[in-house]
Image: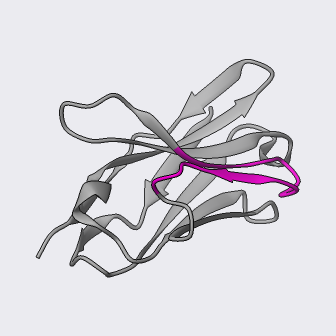
Amino acid sequence: QVQLVESGGGLVQPGGSLRLSCAASGFTFSTYGMNWYRQAPGKERESVAGISSASGSRSYADSVKGRFTISRDNDKNTVYLQMNNLKPEDTAVYYCNAARLGRNYWGQGTQVTVSS
């Protein structure tokens, strides 16, 4: 069955870095666009970053541009989110998403907390 398993979340001080990973299985990973979303307490889920199936294009929310980098390894069926210069407002549950032709798969999420 389809699985998206996020890892790499945790507690980090402002200005610190984390690298999230999302390991995919059960579908043809290389043909799907991959995305990271996040949801903070009391807020709606929002898109953070996306990468096309062949890594030809990337997109970022304005709030994370210049700080976050999305990448993927189609040989390892894994997508990454490198997060630098983290801010308290980045605190949220981060979700991995696979999307193709209207089909969407979601991971269970990983908590990122930015606090001193």
Number of marks drawn: 0
Give x and y (percent) for residue 98.
66, 37
Residue at 32% across, 81% down: 16
Q: Determine if the magenta segment contains residue 52.
A: yes
Q: Is residue 6 above or below residue 75?
A: above
* Residue 37, image x, y percentages: 48, 42
Percent of width and height locating residue 83: 46, 70
Quarter of the image with the N terminus is top right
What colouring style does the render use?
A: one colour
Nearer to the camera, 58 or 55: 58
View extreme (front): residue: 62
In this view, which residue lies farthest toward the top? 102
Please tell me which residue is depicted at 66% across the width and 60% down the height of the picture. 78
Residue 42 placement, left or right of 102: left
Q: Between 36 and 116, which is closer to the camera in this rendering?
A: 116
Of residues 95 and 13, the one nearer the viewer is 13
28 sits to left or right of 21: right
Q: Which residues are magenta?
A: 48-63
Q: Is residue 62 magenta?
A: yes
Residue at (39% x, 77% y) in the render:
85
Query: In the image, residue 35 lies at what x, y percent?
Result: 61, 45
The quarter holding residue 14 reads bottom left
Q: Is residue 57 above or below residue 104?
A: below
Residue located 58% across and 39% down the image: 97
Q: Quadrant of the C terminus?
A: bottom left
